[in-house]
Image (spheres, helix red, strand yellow):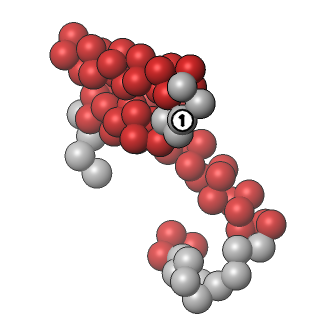
Amino acid sequence: KQPLLFDFTSQALTQKRVREILELREVVEVATAKLAASRRTEEEILVMEEALDEMNGAIERHQSGEEADLKFHLAIAKASDNHL
């Protein structure tokens, strides 16, 4: 069994599997955010603020903020300065 090489296309997503994925995602995202908080540049903060403004605008217009949400999360990942 290779837990980190899970093939999402060949196995049904059971409730347990979904829980495990969410737990792993939480660990990775929290660690990434901590790194970003300590390593970010002013430019990266501006990109994050811009993405948040775009998300708020989408909410006000009753639209999806999916692109802005992705932009925000990618900015956090970039600010972590960890390329893995």
Q: Position of residue 42 (x, y in %)?
A: 21, 11
Going by the picture, which residue comes out furthest to the right? 15
Q: Is residue 41 left or right of residue 53?
A: left
Going by the picture, which residue comes out furthest to the top? 42
Q: Position of residue 72 (x, y in %)?
A: 39, 31
Is 67 drawn above or below residue 7 in the view shown?
above
* Residue 74 visible to the viewer: yes
Q: Position of residue 45 (x, y in %)?
A: 29, 15
Q: How many labels, in total?
A: 1
Q: Position of residue 46 (x, y in %)?
A: 27, 14
Q: Mark 1 highlights which residue?
A: 63
Q: Is residue 5 left or right of residue 17?
A: left
Quadrant assignment, res 43 = top left
* Residue 31 visible to the viewer: no
User: 50 or 59: which is nearer to us?
Assistant: 59
Residue ID at (59%, 30%): 62
Q: Secondary structure at mark 1?
A: loop
Q: Is residue 28 left or right of residue 51?
A: right
Residue ID at (63%, 59%): 21
Going by the picture, which residue comes out furthest to the bottom? 10
Residue ID at (56%, 77%): 8
User: 49 or 56: which is nearer to us?
Assistant: 56
Q: Residues within 10 Å of mark 1 (few under 14, many from 20)?
A: few
Residue ID at (70%, 74%): 13
Quadrant including the N terminus: bottom right
Amino acid at pointer 1: Gln
